[in-house]
Amino acid sequence: MTMPMDQNNQQHHETWPKGTQVVANYNFDGSSPDDLPFKKGDVITIVQSTRDPNWYKGRNDNGKEGMVPATYVQKRKEVHLQAMPWYHGKISREEAEALLNNFREEGDFLIRDSVHFHGDYTLSIYFEGLVDHYRIIAKNNKLEVDGGDCLFDNLIQLVEVL
């Protein structure tokens, strides 16, 4: 099987540590039962490196593990919050309510820095004609919404479930 090459027409050389998230650039059906099939755009978490620098053991969102060709994926880019349209930084509760009341679309939301709890955030959501505010608490390198059961690694992961 021919492996796709990167932009410089070279094979993969960077070593990704356990826990690194990568995104598929191509579909991969796998050629052995040990392979982890995936589709372009899928996010895979690296479980371990192998002796071959062009292959990793990875895990998909469903928890299935298998071999992943490094030349089919790229390291997931870190996205800065300021680039996200839903992140509004240091604005007040009143400013958040004014913004959301201007749109009045069910489920519209924004995330802002917590005014009262440094390092935490506030999720403001327009729902049933009102704006509700929920504290996003940062603890043990995870985020939780108002003491809920779900833990998130970052705000982007949290927003993906909204």
Image: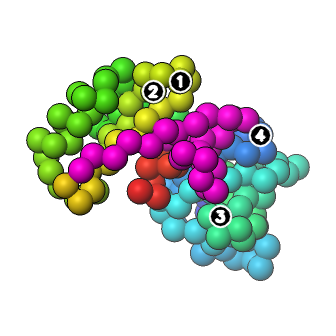
Residue drawn at point x = 59 percent, y = 53 percent: 148
Q: Decide if residue 84 is in sight here.
A: no
Q: How many angstroms separate mark 3 from mark 2 (CA)? A: 33 Å
Question: Which residue lies under the disc numbered 4?
Answer: 17
Could you tell whether 28 is left or right of 108 in the image? right
Tell me, yes or no, whether the highlighted magenta stretch contains residue 147. yes
Q: Decide if residue 90 is in sight here.
A: yes
Locate residue 107: give its quadrant: bottom left
Question: Which residue lies under the disc numbered 2?
Answer: 114
Q: Are marks 1 and 3 in contact (CB under 8 Å)?
A: no
Q: Quadrant of the N terminus?
A: bottom right
Does label 3 or label 2 sit earlier along the sequence?
3
Question: Which residue lies under the disc numbered 1?
Answer: 117
Q: Are marks 1 and 2 in contact (CB under 8 Å)?
A: yes
32 or 9, nearer to the observer: 32
Q: Quadrant of the C terminus?
A: bottom left
Does label 2 or label 4 sit earlier along the sequence?
4
The three-letter code of the residue at mark 3 reads Asn
Element under disc 4: loop
Residue 93 vertical position relative to residue 133 in the rendered view, above or below? above
> What is the span of residues highlighted in magenta in the rendered image?
130-155
Does label 3 or label 4 sit earlier along the sequence?
4
